[in-house]
Image: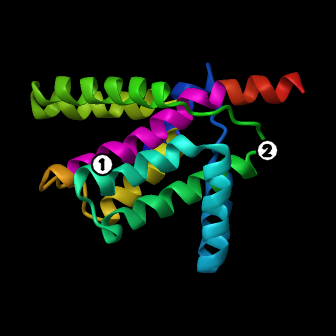
Amino acid sequence: MARKSTAKRATKVTSSAYTPILTPAVLAQAIQDTQGMSVQEKLLLADELYLHQPNLLGFVLVLNTNFGASFEQIEPLIETMIVTWQAMKISGHQWPLITEQLQSDCLQRLTAKMHLTQKVSTALREQALQQHVNSHPEPYLLAFVHEQLNKQVWVQITNSTVKHIVLVALNLAECVAAVAPQAIQESRAK
């Protein structure tokens, strides 16, 4: 129930400047679509994701090679990414390439916000988190990512590998939100 009210508040705050592309209906359709897919269909979708957004998939796969995450640990993150890609497709917009530089910039901003909130009281930390959610350009995607993190109990960061998984998951929402305005502009230009 609290998530719904947060999402509603987020829409009210962001709607004056920007209307999210990945609406609850778009995300719900993407979740439904991917839940009904076979493993082979998901692999084909992952191949499509790699063709159009190779850096997103690469950012996840590097968790295995550089941070020791097992396939079992990154599988839910890959599922989250596949749902996100399906939602991006359903939106009907032409999405620009999410570059390594954009990923790096978004991650830098994200970690700076996290470091800042670690230095304040719990009340201020909660207020900062609420402000971040309320001002996020794609609040429903952010809520979906948080839900996936909660399902895996990753919000309770227990080691360096889990910390990097959480950062990659949150950065997915940040990167998609960063290019969303460009997706709208490119779609309008056509």
Colour scheme of the rendered structure: rainbow
| Callout count | 2
Label 1 SS? helix
The Cα atoms of the two marked residues, 1 and 2, are separated by 28 Å
Task: Judge whether residue 58 is colored magenta.
Answer: no
Q: Is residue 21 visible?
A: yes
> Seen from this angle, which residue lies furthest bottom?
38
Query: Which residue is at the front of the view, 135 or 9?
Result: 135
Numbered badge on residue 166: 1
The image position of residue 177, as x and y in percent, is: 54, 33
Circles 1 and 2 in contact, beta carbons < 8 Å: no
Residue in the foreground of this view, choosing between 165 and 101: 101
Q: Is residue 6 above or below residue 136?
A: below
Residue 170 location in percent, x, y? Answer: 38, 42
Amino acid type of the residue tagged 2 in the rendering: Gly
Q: Which mark is first along the chain, 2 or 1?
A: 2
Residue beneath disc 2:
92
Secondary structure beneath label 2: loop
Please give the range of residues in magenta.
Answer: 162-181
Type of the residue with mark 1:
Val
